[in-house]
Amino acid sequence: MSTIRNICVYCGSGEGADPAFAEAARALGKILAENRIGLVYGGGSVGLMGAIANAVLNHGGEVTGIIPEFLAGREHALTRGTIIVTRDLHERKQKMFEHADAFVALPGGVGTLEEVVEQMTWAQLGQHKKPILLTNINGFWDPLCVLLEHMENMRFIRAGLAVNYLVAQRVEDILPKLKAAASRIDESDKEMKTISIERT
């Protein structure tokens, strides 16, 4: 059985058009702090990133922000908590993976989409079994869910290569869903698998 100590949350550096998005970010931050679960996120202090990080910190929780050097100014790197500055986006994503036991996507833009889909891809290809969850506030992630279903119907997601992810319509459901999923995997399943190639 796997334990969730830290959750990586992908989310926008803007707040979006719906006030419910920022409300969800703040509510999730409070829940993480109250349950003594650390936040791993993109390191910014603005938008939904700032909303969730400040909520965790304001309620006595722990935050690890991971931000590439070139984005530290643009996304106004958080000055509280632990900040890790990376050389580039690739190193950032690898470190976020290493620090997290599960992944949650709040609403966001192309960067958020790319990050959560990459985790889906790694899991689909057997690289890890960490839980992945879409926080579907007011149906934000409905188009992605429809697209994934369409890919499966068109047989681009083939049998044996299912994309496994969770969906929560309410922030209060996130932690119970992640804990239930984590209880079905071993700690070893959270490690990134490496494939050795024998050369002859």
Image (tube, rainbow, N blue to C red):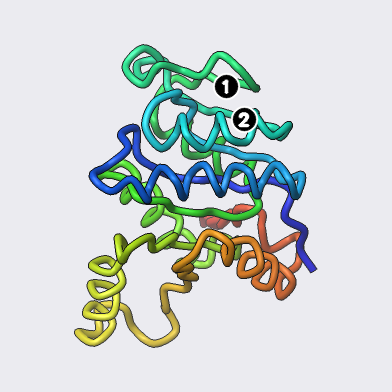
How many other residues sit within 10 Å of disc 1, few (<14), some (14-19) or many (≥20)?
some
- Residue 134 lies left or right of residue 188; in this view the side is left
Q: Nearer the viewer, residue 52 or 27?
A: 27
Q: Quadrant of residue 58?
A: top right
Secondary element at tag 2 = strand
In this rendering, is residue 196 above or below 170?
A: above
Q: Nearer the viewer, mark 2 or mark 1?
A: 2
Secondary element at tag 1 = strand
For marks 2 and 1, give the CA distance: 7 Å
Q: Position of residue 151 (x, y in %)?
A: 24, 77
Check disc 2 and report the residue beneath it.
64
- Residue 166 lies left or right of residue 30; in this view the side is left
How many other residues sit within 10 Å of disc 2, few (<14), some (14-19) or many (≥20)?
many
Q: Nearer the viewer, residue 114 or 58?
A: 58
Q: Position of residue 154 (x, y in %)?
A: 19, 84
Q: Position of residue 116 (x, y in %)?
A: 40, 53
Q: Quadrant of residue 63?
A: top right
Q: What residue lies at 28% left-to-right and 80% top-to-bottom?
A: 149
Q: Nearer the viewer, residue 128 or 20?
A: 20
In this rendering, is residue 68 above or below 20?
A: above
Q: What residue lies at 44% left-to-right and 84% top-to-bottom?
A: 160
Q: Are the residues flagged by discs 2 and 1 in contact, CB closer than 8 Å?
A: yes
Q: Which mark is residue 100?
A: none
Whichever of labels 2 and 1 marks the residue nearer the N terminus, that label is: 2
* Placement of the N terminus among the 4 image quadrants: bottom right
- Residue 118 lies left or right of residue 78; in this view the side is left
Check disc 1 and report the residue beneath it.
84
Q: What residue lies at 48% left-to-right and 68% top-to-bottom?
A: 168
Q: Amino acid at mark 2?
A: Thr
Q: What residue lies at 35% left-to-right and 50% top-to-bottom?
A: 107
In this rendering, is residue 72 above or below 104?
A: above
Q: Amino acid at mark 1?
A: Ile
